[in-house]
Image (cartoon, grey):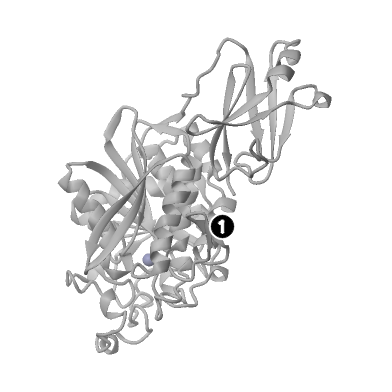
Amino acid sequence: MKHGTSNGKHRIAASCILGLTVGLAAGLAAGPAAAHEGEETGDWRYGCRRGVEIPAGSIVSELRERSESLTFSPIVDQIATRFTQANLDDYLRDLSGMNSVLVGGVPYTFATRYSYSTGGEKSWQYAYEQLLALGYQVRYQNYTRSGHALKNIIATIPGQTTPNKIYVLGGHLDSISQNPTSSAPGAEDNGSGSAAVLAAAVALAGERFSSTIELVLFTGEEQGLYGSQAYVNEALSQGRDIESAVTMDMISYTTTDYGVLIEGETAWSSLMQSMADATDHYTSLDREFSYFSFGSDHVPFQDAGIPAILAIDLDWDEYPYYHRTTDTYEKTNPAFATEIGRAALATVAQLAGPLGPATDVPSAGGQPWSLSFSPNPARSWVSITLANGRPGLEAGLLEQGVRIYDVRGREVRHLVPAADAGGMRIEWNLEDGEAQPLRTGVYWARANGASGRLLIVR
Ligand SMILES: [Zn+2]
């Protein structure tokens, strides 16, 4: 078995960044490597993943303890379906500098997301704005480490019945390389996990759950898990009840194993099983379990006694471009990343108690009209179909048309069906009333008392 302990695969004597032995790297105290080894805590579990010897028998193909299997709601099936490769790929291209993005309305291309750089700060704003556009409550969590002011980005879906219980889905947004202030594309590490968090935000938009879900993009991970530590510290100091955390780090690389490593500890066995159940239910991935947790954002949660697991490629330790300027988009496999991300999302969505989409748009009620959209999410156009069980109402529809509202309830467009479609279908180019393209986000369409939710993704 490839991930067994007999071949010494995990006994890598390379430093985080420079590819040297650990002993040599220790002499480079002034370089970025020095800030990278978790030196502030002196705890190697807060340092880098390379150069750590994984004890024999830690990685196994079967759980040591079985729990009751998770049963997935049809609502989670829907959410998982909306977690698409197209969305993940788009965010991954944004984050790794393949796409020009808008940050504060100004075009920007990411060369680095290093926490101590302008690119890092732009990435925080980018993530914040993307999540805001999807209709979320979003906040920055400000924290200071090593003299640097840093921010995590947190989007919240408040729980309907047990809002104090919080389920976290997260990944680190920051990147590093041997030249981190100018070039650290961080496509695999961890544009992949960050893109999965953002694609999960698309899939979850408008959904409701019994408990609260927080989508968290951590920063300062590469300096010593600073962001996840800050998140956990704040939660503990505020008495917030974090039920569990699923974090993703390096989920887009596969060379010989098409699978996910679910990294936890014995105490978190049931969460490990939930992720395995989701993997089996929603993906074609192999999965293995590691009972040896280190070097990523799950560790601070575990150290606070919170169930937490890491989802990471089975082949993560074979990635040749780890922490290098060559960790670029074309090295990644977005289809593979979509599978890992989908399993992580389904795990959290099921555990949080899915209730289905919000229906908080006022409705005139009473009339058997329905609205549907294809495609949804829409990127450049959408076909809106209206159906009703009462023939003869088309004339009224022609007069009233379909009104489109943004998440704040502002009407952004009034569409009138073409007569040749029998009044029942509208093709729309996603422009507002002033012929401006509508931004990424959730919109509501209303017609004759029916309403429907449309997601526009640019
Ligand atoms: Zn990472």
Could you say whether the residue bearing mark 1 is in a helix, strand or loop?
Answer: helix
Residue 99 vertical placement versus 18 (above, below): above
Residue 9 locus on image (x, y percent): 38, 76
Residue at horizontal 47%, vertical 61%?
192
Extreme right residue here?
A: 420
Q: Is the CB atom of the residue marked by disc 1 within 8 angstroms of ligand 1's nearest atom?
A: no
Q: Please state if 140 lies on the left or on the right of 390 as rendered.
A: left
Residue 388 vertical placement versus 51 (above, below): above
Q: Please state if 386 lies on the left or on the right of 247 as rendered.
A: right
Which residue is denoted by mark 1 in the rendering? Answer: 89
Asked whether the viewer can see residue 240, the reply is: yes
How many numbered callouts? 1
Asked whether the viewer can see residue 286, the reply is: no
The quadrant of the picture occupied by the N terminus is bottom left
* Quadrant field for ligand 1: bottom left
Q: Please state if 373 lies on the left or on the right of 250 as rendered.
A: right
Q: Residues within 10 Å of mark 1 (few under 14, many from 20)?
A: many
Among the 4 quarters of the image, the one containing residue 46? bottom left
Residue 173 vertical placement versus 84 (above, below): below
Residue at horizontal 55%, vertical 42%?
81
Residue 19 locus on image (x, y percent): 38, 84
